[in-house]
Amino acid sequence: MSLLPNPRPRWFAGAVTLSAAAAVTAVVSLALGIKVWSIWLGLLIAAVLLIGQAERLMNAPRVPREHKLRKNLRLIRGGKSAPYDLARDETTNNQRWLM
């Protein structure tokens, strides 16, 4: 949040959204040759709802992806509390490929 005051009034974003919806409605209605005011109003309401849905999708928090569990996890005998001794570890002695 900024310490400077916001110079725009609170209703400004709503007015811009409504005027954008009206402009889209006018362009679509004139391009299709629609002259009935009720269809204009329906298109205006649809445009406002679509803009609102797009705005909601853009501001939605991202859900983190769940990580897949790796299948090749190995169990360390004794758990993490026991000190691990690499010299006594023989689990990789029969490996086919050199790492």
Image (cartoon, grey):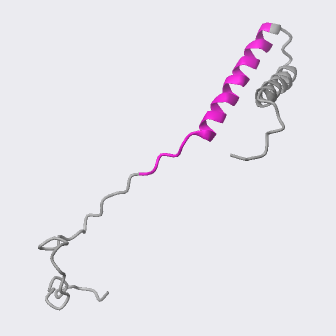
Residue at 17% from the left image edge and 73% from the top image edge: 81
> Which image quadrant for residue 21?
top right
Q: Is residue 43 above or below residue 80?
A: above
Residue 89's spot in the image, x, y percent? Answer: 16, 86
- Dividing the picture into quadrants, the one containing residue 16 is top right
| Residue closest to the eye, 72 or 34 | 72
- In percent of the image, x 54 and y 43: which residue is there? 61
Location of residue 67 with respect to 18 vertically, above or below: below
Comparing 91 with 88, the one in front is 88
Q: Position of residue 33 (x, y in %)?
A: 86, 17
Asked whether 53 falls inside the magenta stretch, the response is yes
Task: Give the x, y percent position of residue 59.
Answer: 61, 40
Query: Compared to 24, does 92 lie above or below?
Result: below
- The image shows a total of numbered marks equal to 0
Query: Can you name the residue that lies furthest to the bottom here?
Result: 87
Q: Would you say 58 lies left or right of 33 here? A: left
Q: Residue at x 87, y 21 (%)?
A: 30
Residue 50 colored in magenta in the image: yes
Extreme-front residue of the structure = 3
* Quadrant for the C terminus in the image: bottom left
Q: Position of residue 4 (x, y in %)?
A: 78, 45
Instruction: Give the residues in magenta.
Output: 38-65
Task: Left or right? Give the position of 6 relative to 92.
Answer: right
The structure residue drawn at horizontal position 79% and vertical position 41%, both measured from the top left corner, is: 5
What is the quadrant of residue 53 in the picture?
top right
- The kind of secondary structure the magenta stretch mainly shows is helix
